[in-house]
Image (cartoon, rainbow, N blue to C red):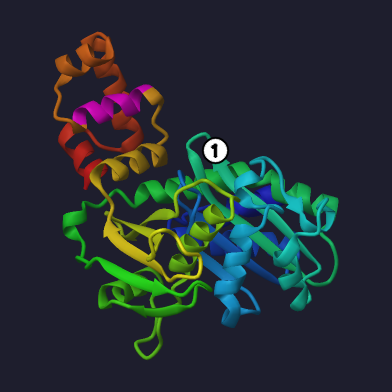
C-alpha cells in the first residue's frame, strides 16, 4: 500500500487538527521510519508556530531548541518548497548551532516538509532519525502526500469558525514574561488558562508554554535578520474563539539581553476576517466583497465601490456561501467577525 493510500485512509472521519496529525504520523511511520518528531500548526500569514505536536528527547531544553530552529537558515520551513520533502543530511551547509544541538541527541538526519498552498502556510513537520539518512524513496513518499495533508490542515482550521464565539467559554487576556533565553519567568492567571485550553494538563502540572516560545523565537529571528515576519500567531483557544499571541522586548531602545513579553489578546475582528478568508479558500474578489460587507455596505454600495454589477456581487456571494457553509450574510459575518 502506498503512503498516499495510507494517509487518505487515516484521514477519513478525522476533523480535529491534533487527531489529524496523530493519524497522519501513524500512517507515515509505516512507510518512513523516524525516532522523534515536531509538527507545528502555523498562522497562515506570519508562518509562526502555534499548536505543536511533538515527541523529542530534549523537553528540558525546549526553549533552546525552538530558539535555534527559528534562527537557522538550514531547511527553515519558511524557505522550503511546498511540493517536496528535504533532508538535512544533504544540506549544503552544516546547519550551524541547530544541527550541533541535534547531534548532542544522536540525531543523524532530519526530514522536513512544509504544508503551504496559495492561501498560506498551515504547518511544518520535522522527522528526526538517529539510525541513518532518509532515503530518496522515503523523501519522495513524504512529498507525495503534501497536497492531501495541506488541504486537510486548512479545512480543520476552517471548521474552527463554525461555532459562534458567544457560545464558548470566555478567557481573560494574559501576559507571559520570558527571559532572553526564552525561559519562562512568570505569567498571569489568564495566560495559564489559555495554555491549559490549548494543551489540557493535569492540575498539578504546569502546561508547557510552547506557543510563547514560538512567538518569542520569531522575535529573535527578526532581530537576527533571519526573518521579517511579525512575531505573532493567531490560534483558536476554543472553536469560535481566536486569540493572538504576540512577542515584544520590554526595553526601548531594544536591548537583546532584556526580557520578552508575550501578550495574549482576542484577535481583532479584521484580523480574524482575514484568517477566515484564507481558511475557506476565498478568491481575492470574494475577500474584497466580504471586507465591504464587514464595513456595513449593502449590495449596491459594494458594487459601486468595486466597480461591479449588482448581479456579479450576488454571484460572488453565492460562491462565498457555498465555500463557508452559510446561507445568509448575517451568519457569514457572525462567523467571520466573531
Q: Please provide percent x and percent y for residue 252.
A: 38, 60
Q: Is residue 171 left or right of residue 15?
A: left
Residue 333 part of the magenta-drawn span: no
Say whether residue 328 is visible: no
Residue 95 in picture, x, y percent from top left: 75, 59
Residue farthest along the front direction in this orientation:
253
Q: Main secondary structure of the magenta part?
A: helix
Element on which disc 1 rests: strand
Please tell me whether residue 309 is drawn above or below residue 153 in the rendered image: above
Q: Residue at x 57, y 75 (%)?
A: 62
Magenta span contains residue 287: yes
**Quick one: which residue is furthest to the bottom in this view?**
204
Side (left or right) of 64 relative to 86 = left
Q: Residue at x 65, y 47 (%)?
A: 145
* Residue at which label 1 appears: 117
Note whether 49 is above or below 100 in the view shown.
above
Residue 143, image x and y in percent?
70, 46
Residue interval drawn in magenta? 285-293
240 or 42, which is in the foreground?
42
- Whether residue 26 can be seen here: yes
Q: Quadrant of residue 323?
A: top left
Is residue 30 toward the left or the right of residue 258 in the image?
A: right
Amino acid at each position: 500500500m502506498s503512503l498516499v493510500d495510507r494517509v487518505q485512509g487515516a484521514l477519513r472521519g478525522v476533523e480535529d487538527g491534533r487527531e489529524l496529525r496523530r493519524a497522519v504520523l501513524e500512517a507515515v511511520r509505516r512507510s518512513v521510519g523516524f525516532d522523534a518528531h515536531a509538527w507545528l500548526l502555523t498562522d497562515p500569514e506570519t508562518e509562526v508556530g502555534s499548536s505543536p505536536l511533538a515527541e523529542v528527547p530534549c523537553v528540558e531544553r525546549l526553549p533552546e531548541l525552538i530558539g535555534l530552529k527559528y534562527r537557522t537558515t538550514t531547511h527553515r520551513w519558511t524557505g522550503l518548497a511546498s511540493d517536496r520533502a528535504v533532508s538535512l543530511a544533504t544540506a549544503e551547509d552544516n546547519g550551524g548551532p541547530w544541527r550541533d544541538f541535534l547531534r548532542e541527541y544522536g540525531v543523524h538526519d532530519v526530514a522536513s516538509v512544509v504544508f503551504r498552498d496559495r492561501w498560506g502556510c498551515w504547518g511544518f513537520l520535522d522527522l528526526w532519525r538517529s539510525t541513518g539518512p532518509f532515503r530518496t524513496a522515503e523523501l519522495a513518499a513524504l512529498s507525495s502526500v503534501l497536497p492531501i495533508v495541506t488541504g486537510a490542515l486548512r479545512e480543520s482550521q476552517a471548521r474552527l469558525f463554525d461555532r459562534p464565539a458567544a457560545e464558548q467559554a470566555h478567557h481573560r487576556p494574559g501576559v507571559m514574561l520570558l527571559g532572553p533565553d526564552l525561559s519562562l519567568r512568570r505569567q498571569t492567571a489568564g495566560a495559564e488558562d489559555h495554555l491549559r485550553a490549548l494543551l489540557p494538563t493535569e492540575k498539578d502540572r504546569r502546561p508547557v508554554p510552547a506557543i510563547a516560545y514560538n512567538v518569542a523565537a520569531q522575535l529573535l529571528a527578526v532581530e537576527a535578520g533571519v526573518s521579517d515576519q511579525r512575531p505573532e500567531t493567531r490560534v483558536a483557544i476554543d472553536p469560535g474563539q481566536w486569540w493572538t499571541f504576540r512577542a515584544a522586548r520590554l526595553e526601548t531602545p531594544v536591548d537583546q539581553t532584556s526580557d520578552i513579553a508575550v501578550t495574549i489578546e482576542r484577535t481583532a475582528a479584521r484580523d480574524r476576517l482575514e484568517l477566515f478568508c484564507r481558511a475557506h479558500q476565498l478568491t481575492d474578489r470574494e475577500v474584497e466583497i466580504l471586507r465591504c460587507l464587514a464595513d456595513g455596505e449593502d449590495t449596491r454600495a459594494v458594487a459601486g465601490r468595486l466597480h461591479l454589477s449588482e448581479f456579479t456581487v450576488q454571484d460572488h456571494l453565492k460562491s462565498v456561501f457555498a465555500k463557508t457553509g452559510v446561507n445568509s450574510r448575517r451568519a457569514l459575518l457572525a462567523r467571520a467577525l466573531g
